[in-house]
Amino acid sequence: ATCSTRASDSDERFFPDPTLSGSGGEDEASADRGALVPDPSTVFDVVADAASGEARLVPAAGASEKALGGMAGLQVSELPEEAEVTIRLFRFFEDRKDEARIWEKELRNVNSGSLMWVPVHMQPKMHSVSGAKYGKWFTVHHIRVYAKQFKSGYFMCEEGCCPLAKAFGATPGMKKLVTGQSLSTGYFWFVSPDKKGSGPSHKDVTDEGNLQKHGWRHLRREGPFDGDAFLAAWRKQGSPTEEKHVQKVLHSMLQ
């Protein structure tokens, strides 16, 4: 495919580094923050903190909160920059056959979204008027990232091409809907490049080298899953926007 930086409609934008820093005294708090780092084997969903809108990590459905010492979640801004965390991302596409393409298999040079992106993308009059703007099939990916990557800029990709992104990056939490209304919580978009500019792609995005070079490492993929099936199950539960209820709907599909 020909590499292009074009993005459609209002999604054509560059997000500069969002402010995710703590309230100060970072050096003094470094020891305390180190104690908050979870086991990288625990898989988290990225959600928006209700008060600040910053990225927060909550155990994905079925994960034990014992890894967090009983806490319900962790603020990304409270983690050491080099802390490695494993997160769950959701990637939509139109043609089911595209699941065989390398960028869909390994999340190379594409955009994906957080937990709340799934209902927001599928439901009409949320992200788009008709819903499912980027397709009705989706896959679930687990990747490992450095905590500092949530500060990195976000770029739109197209067909496995993203020449402007140099490392894994994220948007700030987004709440605004196409109707002008706002969500009570927010969602995030992510970018996962496997190269810098026009340079060569990293050969194996599952290795430690990709984590060091581009800030992320691919671990696994599940799916594809039918977005319409998710939407039906979500509506049957009353179209909840609380993260734990969205997790439950997804959990029933992923078993």
Image: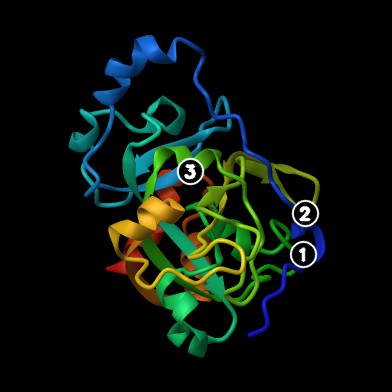
At label 2, the amino acid type is Val
Position of 132 with respect to 23 (left or right) is: right
Q: Which mark is residue 120?
A: none
Expressed as whole percent of the image width and height from the top left, the position of residue 23 reads 51, 14
Q: Which mark is residue 129?
A: 1
Please state, as top left, top right, bottom left or bottom right, where the N terminus lies in the image: bottom right
Q: Does the image show residue 173?
A: yes
Position of 55 with respect to 203 (left or right) is: right
Q: Residues within 10 Å of mark 3 (few under 14, many from 20)?
A: some
Task: Quote the CA–CA distance across marks 3 and 2.
Answer: 28 Å
What color scheme is it? Answer: rainbow
Position of 246 with respect to 40 (left or right) is: right
Q: Which mark is residue 178?
A: 2
Determine whether 255 is above or below 79 in the image. Answer: below
Q: Residues within 10 Å of mark 2 (few under 14, many from 20)?
A: few
Tell me which label, 3 or 1, sits earlier in the chain: 1
Please state, as top left, top right, bottom left or bottom right, where the C terminus lies in the image: bottom left
**SS under mark 3:** helix
Expressed as whole percent of the image width and height from the top left, the position of residue 247 reads 39, 53
Q: Quadrant of residue 92?
A: bottom right
Expressed as whole percent of the image width and height from the top left, the position of residue 240 reads 52, 49
All told, the count of numbered labels is 3
Tell me which label, 2 or 1, sits earlier in the chain: 1
Task: Quote the CA–CA distance across marks 3 and 1.
Answer: 31 Å
For this rendering, which residue is in front, 174 or 245?
174
Q: Residue furthest front?
A: 199
At label 1, the amino acid type is Val
